Image (cartoon, rainbow, N blue to C red):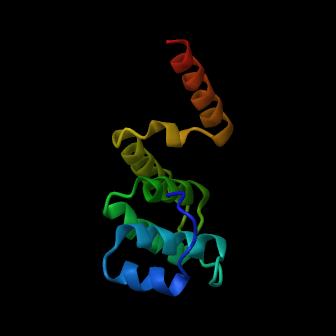
Amino acid sequence: MDEPKQFSFSIWLRQAEAGDAASMFNVAECYSDGTEVNQNPKLAVIWYKRAADKGIVDAMLELGRCYCAGAGVPRDLTQAMHWLKKVYEADHMERLLPTPLRDAREKALRLLLLQD
């Protein structure tokens, strides 16, 4: 969810509490990196889980990372694999790749498309 942070945390929180999945993810991101609020990994995980349960793939990925690293939750590789498998099943496997590999893959695909 690479949308610019044009809303304030309080607006996202209000929308998240009203059930908006994208806002739930944005709230989690704010708690995760300390944007506009004190950093709080436990609250980040709570909001990532709510967003993931509503189908936000980026939240599923972040939950997998949190469980793998023990950030905001006890380290649990079973839970990490559960959430990363959901990313894969949502056909967003490219999100599992590190950014440099993802960038290289995208460049290669663009070059292939230009040759056709």
Q: Nearer the viewer, residue 111 or 40?
A: 111
Placement of 105 over or under 47, stated as above or below: above
Give me the residue at 46% from left, 79% from top: 12
Placement of 100 over or under 63, stated as above or below: above
Q: How many marks?
A: 0
Give me the residue at 36% from left, 68% from top: 21
Q: Quadrant of residue 8?
A: bottom right
**Percent of width and height locating residue 23:** 43, 72
95 relative position to 102: left or right: left
Placement of 81 over or under 36, stated as above or below: above
Which residue is situated farthest in the right direction here?
100
35 relative position to 116: left or right: right
**Percent of width and height locating residue 41:** 58, 73
Give me the residue at 58% from left, 74% from top: 30
36 relative position to 19: left or right: right
10 relative position to 85: left or right: right
**Percent of width and height locating residue 58:** 47, 55
**Percent of width and height locating residue 37:** 62, 84
Q: Nearer the viewer, residue 23 or 39?
A: 23
